[in-house]
Amino acid sequence: MAVDTLGPAKRLSKEHRAIERAIWLLSSVRRNAEGGDLTRNQQVQIDKSTSVIGAALLRMLDAEEAALFPVLAAVPALKAQVKRLEAQHGAVRALVGQVAPRFRAWLRDGSITAAENAALARDLGALQALLFEHLRAEEQTLFPHADHHLSPDDVAGLVRILDGRPQEDAR
């Protein structure tokens, strides 16, 4: 697979770009539709984008926590930064837990109230701002070290989680 030949930093950066696109599309649809009726194209964008943030984003967080953070936290100069970024993962998960169900309800019900739209705008804006800061911090402070410090087994575990494949049995 071509994607498996990427180093861990490039693979994670590629995941980051897909997540940023999904968040941007959700923000654009929310702003343009203002909680009202959705066009078919907007419905498709919401469906695909909520899948990205509801699955791919959460897998990326899991992969970083399982395969990247433990290794880089052992580097004394990175320990505090890893701890801070790992703590932000909880906030990201909480915001995804607010945003994704609201978009799915909008798809299901055809529209949302003005209050629901305002809450969605607030939480989506918070998620977008947090992710922008968080992803940049990872790319600037951690990813430059990933290719050097991760073992081939660490990289294989990271890719397995990102791809949504189960962990292989230890032999």
Image: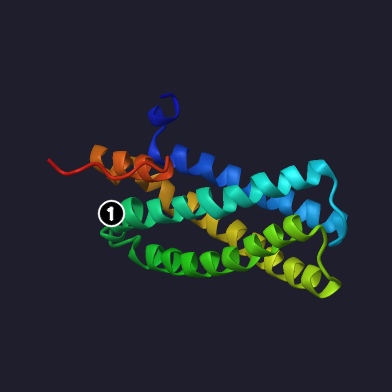
Looking at the picture, tell me which residue is in the foreground, 104 or 12: 104
Q: Is residue 27 left or right of residue 96?
A: right
Q: How many marks?
A: 1
Residue 21 visible in the displayed image: no
Looking at the image, which residue sits at the far left?
A: 171
At x 53%, y 70%, the residue is 91
Neighbor class of circle 1 (other Cα within 10 Å; few <14, some 14-19, many 20+) is many
- For the point 45% across and 64% down, the residue is 85
Considering the image in quadrants, where does the C terminus appear? top left
Image position, residue 168 (x, y; %): 24, 41
State which quadrant residue 131 falls in.
bottom right
Judged from the image, the secondary structure of the residue bearing numbered disc 1 is helix
Instruction: Establish if 97 lies above or below 52.
Output: below
Q: Is residue 47 left or right of residue 157?
A: right
In this figure, which residue is indicated by the disc labeled 1? 71
| Amino acid type, residue under disc 1 in the picture | Val
Residue under the image location 47 percent in, 64 percent down: 89
